Image (spheres, rainbow, N blue to C red):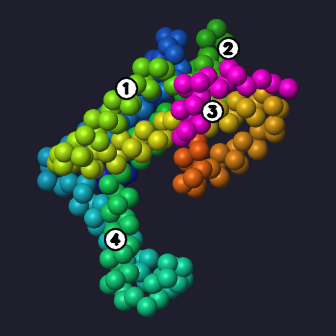
Amino acid sequence: MYSNLMLILLLILPIPMLIRGLKKGAGPYRTILEGAVLSGVGIAFIFVIAQVSGQGIGAEIDNAIGSMAKALADNDQMTQVMGMSQSSTQERIDAYKALYEASAQVLPSALLIMGLIISWIEGMILGRAIKKDGVPLDPVPPFREFTLPRNTIFGWFIIYIISWILKAAHFSGGEFLLANVNILFQFTFALQGMALAFHFSYLKRIPKVVPVIVVIVLWLTSIGHLILFFAGILDLFLGLKKRIKGR
């Protein structure tokens, strides 16, 4: 129930903020971020309501984890792939539950990233649908032009350091906080690295499908994700986009 409600909020809540920002002519990235933040607030509200009502989302997640772990444990093909042929059914269930529980720890950051992506897509759609004097606003620039504001960069570093200190001090919830902040931190700068890749391919007149494939491959591997992360940081501090020249 809660998962469906959260998905609905992720889809609906950014829309009024996006429409207002588009009509006011606010900065496109700021408008998209505000839409994503509003959806994040809505998700947090659902968590609070669920906790107050005594029907915590944690219980729903635990039930879902148990069902998925049992389904995988009963799958012979998955058992062979994971090298668990010699393990008992209960041992397989426990192993899968551990994996799912680790993933559930970063659910808040995953929802925020999903909210940002949805807000971005809706911003592009609304920018073409909303018209001013008969002309679509179309305010969202190409992804290759995406650049993080300076205050966002330093803000993220401060948040990351605070989270790391809380974990090092064994503060309650510090490990949970750092895990989510770390994902958001890496995603933010990897996003800048992706924009750099698209900018490079555009200036070099490389077919559009090439950077798409390259970015997907990099994103799906740990070393590739690290490359995008550091490429984003280098772009922000060294201005690589301005240094790259077209043919």
Left or right, residue 6 beside residue 246: left
Judging by the rendered image, the residue that carries numbered circle 2 is 135
Tell which of 246 and 212 is nearer to you: 246
Judging by the rendered image, the residue that carries numbered circle 3 is 195
| Lower position in the chain sequence, tag 2 or tag 4 | 4
Classify 6 as above or below 134. Answer: below
Judging by the rendered image, the residue that carries numbered circle 1 is 155
Judging by the rendered image, the residue that carries numbered circle 4 is 97
Q: Which segment is the magenta one?
A: 229-247
Mark 4–mark 1 distance (CA, rounded to whole Å): 35 Å
**Magenta stretch containing residue 236, yes or no?**
yes
Q: Main secondary structure of the magenta part?
A: helix
Q: Residues within 10 Å of mark 4 (few under 14, many from 20)?
A: many
Q: Residue at x 55, y 26 (%)?
A: 236
The quadrant in which residue 210 appears is top right
For the residues labelled 1 and 2, say whether their Cβ atoms are less than 8 Å apart. no
| Lower position in the chain sequence, tag 1 or tag 3 | 1
Nearer the observer, disc 1 or disc 3?
Answer: 1
Q: Residue at x 47, y 20 (%)?
A: 150
